[in-house]
Image: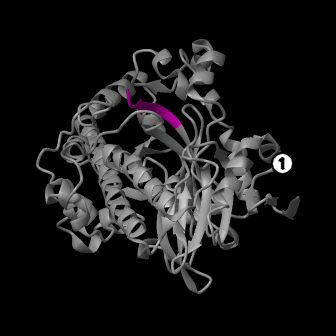
């Protein structure tokens, strides 16, 4: 049974509970049946408070990407499957003083790509340029664990945007849980700080167009029409990636001991207050610290490249940094709840007390990437978002698998979508488009339909549209 609440909000009754779906008619009717099968498996975890899909929902491992799932902290459950493998994966945007006309010349943009690649390792096996960063410090202290030389506003404590303009600058972590982690994890974590990673991770040079109805907010955030911004998408790299399989195995053993399970062997869970649950959450927080630092250091590298081209005094302040793969204790309905967001973004409205101080008045920027070659969006949460625990989409969401994309989409189609050969060509750092065909726009849903779904559901509003000018992809 489907209950239509209006405003792009439907409640689908499944065998084991209710699934809230936030999508317009076109997106809702395009969702494949398997997403509901997967949701019903997830709803077999006891004592679920709320479960929903945002419009970018698509099949993942154990749980759909685009899921928000919530349990009470007192007697609920935590699931690594509903956090995702790239723990802490998220978005970051930096502002520049440049206007799009300043970098319209394609040769200049090519030079900019090369300058950035000088400082940011984009090869999947590339190594960090920052050998004096202590991994144990950033895992336990987040940005505060970085040497001062990498924090541009370290010596101006009253204006430390590096700390004040991020969703979380530090998660509390007990390092005693690090003791039996393999040396390989530490070595790879040290080697990957400030590296981009492959798949859908990217650095994108964009120009923005402000939504007229939100111009006052945009101006308070320091945005202007035609402004060049830098958008970054990356996560916790191997540190988070290696925690997932390790604890999936441990959780499976515990579930077998307890005599519980679901039809999907990839869906694992444990009581939040169990030793397994507490240890996973503690180590997950270390991966969240790593992810925020990794994006910070990628941005540091981009800034160095910008300074090489535009001068030592070039400024590139952070607008915001946020995550879309995690589980976090949040107060809702007068009690603490564990909010899992797997491919969903928190979007708090103006005045919400969980906003960082810099964004209390307006609400914080919610950063939503499109697919390569299409627009991305900077949004702000609305009060009605409380119905979905302030969760919105995290991007366009995949439409088809990497393999299917390579079989169905030609390089010529990809090239056309990137405007190759025109003055408006979106430049890419890859030698051939064929090497990244599985990341072409045609692999993803229509981001405009995704944004229309979110806006129509009154979960968030568009502050600015971001159009790509150059893309740096991981190899």
Residue 149 image position (x, y, % from top left): 14, 55
Tell me the element at label 1: helix
Verify whether residue 42 appears in magenta: no
Tell which of 240 and 98 is nearer to you.
240
Magenta residue check for 470: yes
Displayed quadrant of residue 134 = bottom left
Left or right, residue 379 beside residue 200: right
Which corner quadrant holds the C terminus? Answer: top left
The type of colouring in the image is: one colour
What span is colored magenta in the figure?
Answer: 468-475
Q: Residue at x 55, y 73 (%)?
A: 76
Q: Is residue 218 visible?
A: no
Which residue bears the numbered disc 1? 25
Quadrant of the rendered structure where residue 466 is? top right
Decide: is 179 above or below 405: below
User: Total label count?
Assistant: 1
Q: Nearer the viewer, residue 411 or 230?
A: 411
Residue 46, horizontal then vertical, whole percent: 63, 68
Residue 79 image offset from top left, x and y in percent = 51, 60
How far across and how far down the image is residue 235, in percent?
39, 48
């Amino acid at each position: 049974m489907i209950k239509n609440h209006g405003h792009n909000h439907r409640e689908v009754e499944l065998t084991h509970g209710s699934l809230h779906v936030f999508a317009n008619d076109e997106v809702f009717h395009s969702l494949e049946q398997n997403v509901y099968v997967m949701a019903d498996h997830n709803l077999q975890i006891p004592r679920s408070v709320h479960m929903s899909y945002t419009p970018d929902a698509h099949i993942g491992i154990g749980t759909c990407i685009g899921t928000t799932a919530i349990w009470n902290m007192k007697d609920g459950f935590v699931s690594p499957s509903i956090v995702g493998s790239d723990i802490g994966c998220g978005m970051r945007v930096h502002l520049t003083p440049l206007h799009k006309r300043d970098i319209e010349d394609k040769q200049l943009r090519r030079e900019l790509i090369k300058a950035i690649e000088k400082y940011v390792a984009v090869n999947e096996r590339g190594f960090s340029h920052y050998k004096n960063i202590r991994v144990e410090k950033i895992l336990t202290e987040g940005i505060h664990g970085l040497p001062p030389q990498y924090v541009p506003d370290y010596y101006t404590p009253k204006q430390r945007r590096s700390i004040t303009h991020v969703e979380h600058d530090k998660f509390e972590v007990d390092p005693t849980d690090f003791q039996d982690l393999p040396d390989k994890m530490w070595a790879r974590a040290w080697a990957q700080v400030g590296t981009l990673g492959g798949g859908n991770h990217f650095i994108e040079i964009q120009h923005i167009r402000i939504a007229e109805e939100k111009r006052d907010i945009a101006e308070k955030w320091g945005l202007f029409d035609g402004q060049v911004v830098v958008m970054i998408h990356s996560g916790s790299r191997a540190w988070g990636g290696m925690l997932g399989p390790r604890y999936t195995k441990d959780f499976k053993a515990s579930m077998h001991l307890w005599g519980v399970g679901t039809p999907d062997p990839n869906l694992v869970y444990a009581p939040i207050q169990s030793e397994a649950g507490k240890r996973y959450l503690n180590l997950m927080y270390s991966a969240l610290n790593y992810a925020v630092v990794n994006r910070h250091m990628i941005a540091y590298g981009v800034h160095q490249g910008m300074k090489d081209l535009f001068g030592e005094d070039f400024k590139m302040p952070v607008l915001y940094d946020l995550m879309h793969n995690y589980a976090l204790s949040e107060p809702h309905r007068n009690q603490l709840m564990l909010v899992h967001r797997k491919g969903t973004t928190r979007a708090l409205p103006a005045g919400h007390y969980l906003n960082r101080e810099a964004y209390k008045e307006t609400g914080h920027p919610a950063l939503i990437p499109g697919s390569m070659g299409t627009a991305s969006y900077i949004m702000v949460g609305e009060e009605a978002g409380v119905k979905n625990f302030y969760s919105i989409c995290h991007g366009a969401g995949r439409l088809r698998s990497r393999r299917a994309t390579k079989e169905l989409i030609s390089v010529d189609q990809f090239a056309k979508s990137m405007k190759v050969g025109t003055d408006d060509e979106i430049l890419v750092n890859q030698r051939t488009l064929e090497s990244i065909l599985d990341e072409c726009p045609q692999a993803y849903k229509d981001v405009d339909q995704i944004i229309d779904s979110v806006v129509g559901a009154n979960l968030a509003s568009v502050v600015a549209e971001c159009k790509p000018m150059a893309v740096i992809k991981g190899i």
